[in-house]
Image (cartoon, rainbow, N blue to C red):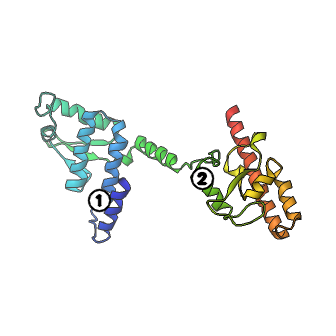
C-alpha cells in the first residue's frame, strides 16, 4: 500500500511544481508520516504520540514551516480526557515535555505571556528512528535462501529444474516436455542425497531407468562413449555437473558449520 500511494504521488507531482519554501514535499510528508506511525510510535506513549501528530500536521501540512507558535490551550482543545473534556493545561504540558525529552520537539525560548514557540522535527531526524529504518532496510534486503528447498516433490520447483536444464535430458541431451521428464539425484538418495536443486538434474525415462543409483559422472561418460553427443557437448555437461556437485558440497558444509556454531 505504501508503495502504491507513493507511486500515485509521483504521478501527481510530475504535473505540478511543488513550493520551495524550506518545508517538505508532499511525498516527503507521506514518508515521514509513515515513519511516525511505524517507528516513532514505538518511542512514545499514546498521549505524546497524539500530540506529536497534531504538531506535525500543523507544522508541515498547514503552515509549511517546522517552527510554529501554538497555545497549550489550543492543543488541549483537540485532545479529550477520560472524562470527555478537553485536556488540562498541565496534562498537555507533560505531553509536550515528553516530546522534548526524546528530542522530536524543541521548545524555543519565549518571554512570559508570549505564545509558546516550538520546532517540530521530522521522525527521520531521530537517531532511534534512523536505527529502526536501517534495521528494516537490512531485513528487507536479505535474500531468501532456497538452497535447501525440496525441488523433487514440489511441482513448480520441478519445472524450475527443467527450465534450468533447457528442456533437455542432462545425460543424453534429448528434448523433454513438461509431461515426460524425470528428475535424477546426482548424489543418490540411497546414499543420503538431498532433494536440493544442486543435487537434481533432468532426465529422460530411459536415462533415469538405466542410471538408477550409479555415479552421475560415470553414467555421463558411458553415454558419451555410446556416441549420444559430441565431445564439446560432453565437456559442457561435465563442467555443469562439476559446478552442481561443488555447490551442493558447499551448501552441506555451510549448514553443517552453522549447526556446530
Residue 261 visible in the displayed image: no
Measuring 72% from the left and 59% from the top, which residue is drawn there?
204
Residue neighbourhood size for the residue with mark 2, other residues' Cα within 10 Å, grouped as few (<14), some (14–19), many (≥20): some
Q: Which element type, helix, strand or loop, lies under badge 2?
A: helix
The alpha-carbon separation of the residues under discs 2 and 1 comes to 43 Å
Residue hosting label 1? 26
Where's the C terminus, which quadrant?
top right
Number of labels in the image equals: 2
| Residue extending farthest right | 225
> Does 184 appear above or below 191?
below
Q: Which mark is residue 157?
A: 2
Marks 2 and 1 in Cβ contact (< 8 Å)? no
Q: Considering only order in the chain, which callout, 1 or 2, is on the residue closer to the N terminus?
A: 1
Depth order, front residue of 11/189: 189
Measuring 42% from the left and 43% from the top, which residue is drawn there?
127
The answer to whether residue 51 is left or right of residue 146 is: left
Measuring 80% from the left and 47% from the top, which residue is drawn there?
213
> Does 111 appear above or below 157?
above
Between label 2 and label 1, give the one nearer the viewer. Answer: 2
| Residue extending farthest left | 85
Residue 251 is drawn in which quadrant? top right
Q: Which mark is residue 57?
A: none
Residue 184 location (% of width, % of height) = 73, 52
Residue 185 visible in the displayed image: yes
Amino acid at each position: 500500500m505504501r508503495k502504491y500511494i507513493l507511486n500515485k504521488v509521483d504521478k501527481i507531482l510530475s504535473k505540478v511544481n511543488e513550493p520551495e519554501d524550506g518545508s517538505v514535499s508532499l511525498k516527503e510528508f507521506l514518508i515521514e508520516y509513515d515513519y511516525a506511525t511505524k517507528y516513532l510510535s514505538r518511542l512514545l506513549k499514546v498521549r505524546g504520540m497524539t500530540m506529536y501528530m497534531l504538531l506535525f500536521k500543523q507544522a508541515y501540512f498547514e503552515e509549511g514551516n517546522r517552527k510554529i507558535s501554538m497555545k497549550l490551550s489550543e492543543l488541549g482543545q483537540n485532545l479529550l480526557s477520560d472524562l470527555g473534556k478537553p485536556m488540562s493545561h498541565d496534562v498537555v504540558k507533560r505531553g509536550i515535555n515528553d516530546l522534548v525529552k526524546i528530542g522530536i520537539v524543541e521548545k524555543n525560548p519565549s518571554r512570559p505571556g508570549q505564545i509558546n514557540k516550538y520546532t517540530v522535527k521530522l521522525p527521520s531526524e531521530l537517531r532511534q528512528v534512523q536505527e529502526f529504518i536501517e534495521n528494516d532496510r537490512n531485513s528487507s534486503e536479505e535474500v531468501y535462501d532456497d538452497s535447501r528447498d525440496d525441488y523433487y516433490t514440489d511441482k513448480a520447483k520441478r519445472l524450475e529444474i527443467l527450465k534450468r536444464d533447457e528442456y533437455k535430458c542432462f545425460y543424453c541431451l534429448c528434448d523433454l516436455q513438461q509431461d515426460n521428464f524425470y528428475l535424477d539425484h546426482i548424489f543418490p538418495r540411497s546414499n543420503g542425497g538431498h532433494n536440493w536443486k544442486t543435487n537434481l538434474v533432468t532426465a529422460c525415462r530411459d536415462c533415469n531407468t538405466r542410471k538408477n543409483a550409479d555415479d552421475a559422472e560415470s553414467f555421463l561418460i558411458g553415454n558419451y562413449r555410446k556416441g549420444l553427443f559430441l565431445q564439446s557437448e560432453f565437456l559442457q555437461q561435465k563442467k555443469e555437473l562439476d559446478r552442481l556437485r561443488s555447490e551442493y558440497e558447499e551448501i552441506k558444509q555451510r549448514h553443517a558449520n552453522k549447526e556446530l556454531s
